[in-house]
Amino acid sequence: MRFGVLGVIWSDWQDVGYEQVAFARELGFAGIGAHLTVPASTITDEVAANVRGAIDANKMDMLQVWGPYPTIISEDEDVRREGVRGASDVVRLAARMGVPEAGVRPTSHNPRGDWWPHPENHSQASEDRLVRSISEILEVAVPAGVKVVLEAHATSTLDSPARIRRVVERTDPSSVTVNIDPVNFVRDLPTAFDSTAMVDEYFDVCGEFCGTVQVKDYYLEDRFVVHIAETVPGSGMLDIDTVLRRTEALSPDMYAVVEHLPVGLIGQALGHLAARAAALGIEVH
């Protein structure tokens, strides 16, 4: 198993340098992904080369590139096409940088954010538009040699392992992978109190398409009605041992990725995951 991190690079990339990446390497990470806060089309060759150079100089793998774009499930065809163009620009940027995967979010009908809920997210029509959009993005990705990696969440059109698998199979299983992120499917109290069955289902259904595994944790807030919040791995309720075992079973080289944490808590997360991996007899390299 290898450990990677998302969130250290999350900007317009003007601030990325050797020392920023060295922080992740010195903690013990082998790979790093990069998020953009500006459209991928605005990234110059110079900026892209600087980011790639900082990662290469630290002898780390560059795992994935992520960037913003309009919704790709919109009923408005002009908006959907603009979203496809933006996501395709992320693919083109990944190709320019020699990165193996470009991230694609299913987005949302909710205008307040890509991951916020909306009833139409779960419709068959939205799934069909998502399949169409991914297929169009693949028209850029496949010739460029870049895989599309999907992020999924219970609030999105990719709202269950079964639906994720169906969407992958409706597009191109040889070119589409999935970030398995179990915390994103803790949707009720029974699952929150005992997450093992949910974790196993996710790996059983989607494991063959796995790009990376994202390891977060969660806890229940003492608030009405039900509030499930993310937290540092090891401080919450997720069955992390099962996540690590299933990750290692996919491949000894599979990446378990820490994300969604303030920089000051990333080391704590990695320390817990490394300790659990050692206790389970999993070799980390």
Image (cartoon, rainbow, N blue to C red):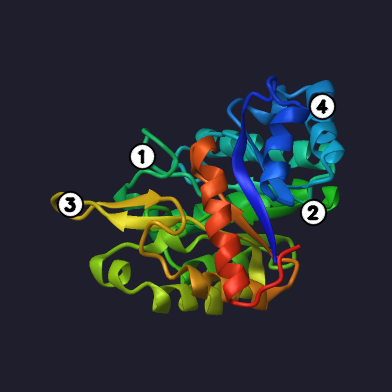
Mark 3 Cα shell of 10 Å, populated few (<14), some (14-19), many (≥20): few
Expressed as whole percent of the image width and height from the top left, the position of residue 213 reads: 59, 62
Q: Which residue is mark 4?
A: 50
**Closer to the camera, 14 or 151?**
14
- Closest to the camera, between mark 1 and mark 4, is 4
In percent of the image, x 40 and y 79: which residue is there?
A: 197
Amino acid under disc 1: Asn
Which mark is on residue 110?
1
**Residue at numbered disc 3:** 222
Q: Which residue is mark 2?
A: 142
Mark drawn on residue 255 = none
Q: Nearer the viewer, mark 2 or mark 3?
A: 3
Q: At x 74% / y 72%, what residue is drawn?
A: 252
> 10 Å neighbourhood of mark 2: few (<14), some, or many (≥20)?
some
Q: Position of residue 174 (x, y in %)?
A: 74, 67
Q: Would residue 160 appear left or right of 176 to someone viewing this image? A: left
Asked which quadrant contains residue 35, the reply is top right
On screen, residue 163 above or below 40: below
Q: Nearer the viewer, mark 3 or mark 4?
A: 3
- Give me the C-alpha separation between circle 1 and circle 3: 27 Å
